[in-house]
Amino acid sequence: MNLDSYFIAEEPYYSPTHNEIQLFEAAYATRMPMMLKGPTGCGKTRFVEYMAWKLKKPLITVSCHEDMTASDLVGRYLLDAEGTVWHDGPLTLAVRYGAICYLDEIVEARQDTSVVIHSLTDDRRMLSLEKKNEVVKAHQDFQIVISYNPGYQSVLKDLKESTKQRFGAIDFDYPKADDEAKIIAHESGIDVDTARKLVQISDRSRNLKGHGLDEGASTRMLIYAAQLISQGVSLEDACEVALVLPITDDHDIRNALSSAIEACA
Amino acid sequence: MAAASTTRGKYAVLPQHKEPGDPDERLVFLIEKAKSFFPKEYYPLWKDSCNRLAQAGYGTLIPLSYARHSPKLVKLLNSEAAINLAATVSLAAIKVNRATAELLPKAAVIAAHELQNYSSFIAWINTIEELIQSAPESVLAVLERTQKIVTTLTPTQFKSWVLAGLRSTGDDTLRQIQYFSFTDPESEKWFRHEAGDVVYTDLDRKLKLYLISLWNLRPPIRDLPASTAPLSLRRISITNGVVRVPEVFPGFHGEQAEKIFRAGLAHVGAHLVYSTKRFPLGELKPIQVALVSLLEDARVEHLAMQVFPGLRKLWLPFHVAKSNGPKLVPLLLARLSRALIDENYHDGDGWIQKGRDMFFDSSNDMSDPIMCRKIGVLLGNDLGQLRAQFNAKTYVVEPPYRDDNMGLWDFGDQQGTEEDDQGIFIEAMRMEQQEKEDSSESDTEREENDEESEQQYHARESTDQEQRESEVAVRYPEFDYLTGTERPNWTCVVEYFPDFGDAYKIERILETHQNLVNRITNLIQSANVSLPERLHHQNIGESLDLDACINAIISRRMGEIPDPHIYSTTERKHRDLSVMVLLDISNSTNDRIPKSGTSVLELEIQSTALLAYAMSELKDPFAISAFCSDGKEDVHYYRIKNFGTDYDSTARAYLAGLTGKLSTRMGPAMRHAARDLTLQRTHRRLLLVISDGEPSDIDVKDKNYLVEDARKVVRSNSRLGIDTFCVGLDAGGDNYLHKIFGRKNVAVIDNIDRLPERLPMLYLRLTA
């Protein structure tokens, strides 16, 4: 099996906010399982892509969802003309052939999913495929990375303590204003001044976190707004479409946010 | 206007023919004189009305007043208005008193003058008649204020305001009089509300969020009733971090009003961020104080606009000073304000030019407020040399969105040695501080409560002013079917701690109803829906469905297209339902059932105990609350069990401890219960109301009113995704219960003795 299609060919744009690149490189050197924490849309996924490119390793990304089961990760029997055949799941693929396996938003998946990775995250570094009666030793390049957003998890959807303690963690937050403006300008092609204004606007929404908003506007949202602006949409309209309306249904918050945006414009 | 013209009318006509002194003769004289006012065919009718009033034994003043004023209605409206007025006058004389009846014709002329439209006038008369019937003691107060009322409110709004008064005061005559004579602050508030003025409370949440969003500021904000605030407090004011906002900005309506509140709070925000130090008062003259304040206003706005350039668009429209006015100090100050914010404003006045130049002089460090003091003192001296008069007592900061700037000054301990002019500032300050002391406690409490109230509730939370044994008080609107609108923040639901009863009582209930408990248990087991179920023949699944696989292979070998449903999965079909049981514990539940001698409340408790057993066995999340009411300001609400908590001995003790008392204001209690339910993330949400009687309350005479409000709540609940179901314990209650909840959603239990057995069964059927 060849994982060529999982290599990242071009350098993804990533602007470091801190020393996270060095930290991750060090973690990879010892193949330490990593956990990336931080609010939605702050660049966790982009960071993993960048690291995979930098380390020249294939990256297998799995976006976890509520209905995802262990077999979706590990693999299952399927039928073909001759009978049943085993089909490796994405995790098994990464373990067998040596890739970075990135489980995005792992808490969204069912509880049994997170237990599957336990044997991979300690010194055994192996995955047992019960149904196939096989034990896969991890390839030397294999590393597991999960992302975890502590902000909006309910009590029911938290990582088990036994899972949490198997990972090293890097904390992400929205970049500093100037850096964020640069990122927005780069991703959307608008000028830095407008980008800076967008960042200022996003601070207005981040202030409202905990006062009716669960999360302020993410960098991703700002990039969307900026992309609209680059298409000739006015700043106010772009913010309305990409920021205010998606973020809340509460009329008063919308009103407050729109007025605050007017103040920034 | 109208009052002036009527008085003028009286004196303009009279001197020509002197009125006779004798009342009877005078009446004849007035009747004769009115002849020219009326069309021929109507005059005899009007004359009859006069004579009837004269012979009815009301004394002489009433027919005289009618004969004097009502002819004026002919010209303003028509003859019928003048003639029909007699009936209303007569009604007032019988139901109220002679003084009121005497005033009525005069008030009617004032109203007609403003309304200028017969149908509006009839609407006004109808409302007056309604008031005569329901609150006779207050009619005089309303008639005396006819001018104020008709110039501000349309007849419909007037009716709505009268209704608000009747609804809020109930049968309390004294409070009615206070309301209708505007001595009750509520009155002015609702008056403004009906007039369409935007009241601060309407915007409270929006504007607080705005301040948080812009500067992450959360100052405590209190609104001041417009009627009680002295002139100087018609502006926003900041003292010790507490922001006081006038309830209304008179003259600003609709969007304009929202803008001025927003502009005002943005200005407050700028002060809170940039006015970090207070100026010592020192030896400054009042004009210098005013100028330094003005410059400081301009400075903080300038700094704020550097960060938020869009604020200019918000503030600028309020600066309307013209450069060509007379050179009076207040006008000059307003012009200077404008010159400092509006780059496109040209003012030829040397003093203003000088102020502008000094302010924008590049050597000034905008971040340091000391520049304002420096410039203010100089400009003040200039004005002094011009001998311009400045009266600190009447001075009000312009434009109106700016605050009174009292918070900028450090008055030190000079209060004893003040000159008069400075005294006014101190006085205003003292007044505010006093108020601050009175209310400081509730301010901090309110601030804490904000956290909670911002959890997507539209209901506003406020702490209870009185010392009550309560956790929290929440205000809700109430629907008035007569106006078709909801009055915001009209009722107050107060959560009280329930009394402890004997928890074992609940267990004894289960024991005595052992048969029933067994039946419920069986039913639950047979309906036990939480067992995992294996689903075969699935499109997706965790494991292969062998039979389906084999069939698929067979079809394949036969050259057919195989059925892709070859997986099996297990699924827990869980009940996704949360229930709020709301018990009516009004006084009527103390009634005893003739047959068994148990009280209705006792049966409610028994059936709830059994129901709670069933619900906890089914593992449905549920909550139990009880309510009764003592007027609109005090709807009691007891939490027996909350959604998050266990149905433990505490909950059981609370349930056993319920006592029946007070009345049944169902709407607010249902609104409060629905608030908890909306936070439940289950697929279905059920509000189960158990009530023994029609909604009623001590301050409501109109039975329909509370029924219609409850009906409104049920409808809005269904919009929120909450099903409301009622178990009625009143055999005759079909009518109003059907009206409130809809025919399908009511189960009336005629034999109340059977409630404990019926309720859990009903629940199982309802939620199956």
Image (cartoon, rainbow, N blue to C red):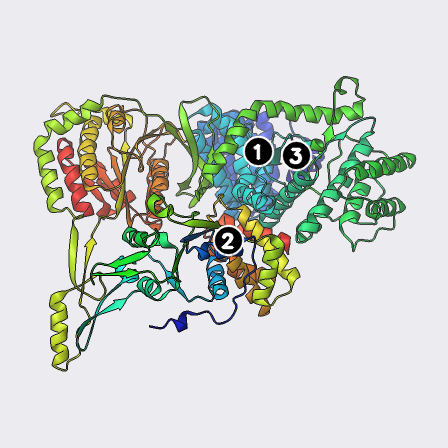
Name which of mark 1 and mark 3 comes first in the sequence.
Answer: 1
Q: Which residue is mark 1?
A: B222
Mark 1–mark 2 Cα distance, whole angstroms, equals: 51 Å
Subunit of label 3? B
Q: Amino acid at mark 2?
A: Leu
Q: Nearer the viewer, mark 1 or mark 2?
A: 2
Residue B507 appears in the rendering: yes
Q: Quadrant of the N terminus of chain B?
A: top right
Subunit of label 2? A
Q: Is residue B459 above or below residue A249?
A: above
Q: Position of residue A107 (x, y in %)?
A: 36, 51
Residue B42 appears in the rendering: no
Q: Describe residue B306's horizontal placement relative to residue B436 as left or right.
A: right
The residue lying toward the viewer, choosing from A175 and A122, is A122
For the residues beneath circles 1 and 3, the answer to whether they share a chain is yes
Q: Residues within 10 Å of mark 2 (few under 14, many from 20)?
A: few
Pick out the residue farthest to the left. B515
Q: Which residue is mark 3?
A: B237
Q: Quadrant of residue B183?
A: top right
Q: Quadrant of residue B541?
A: bottom left
The residue lying toward the viewer, choosing from A31 and B13, is A31
Residue that appears at 77% across and 40% down = B368
Q: Which residue is mark 2?
A: A23
Q: Secondary structure at mark 2?
A: helix
Q: Quadrant of residue B662?
A: top left
Q: Secondary structure at mark 1?
A: strand
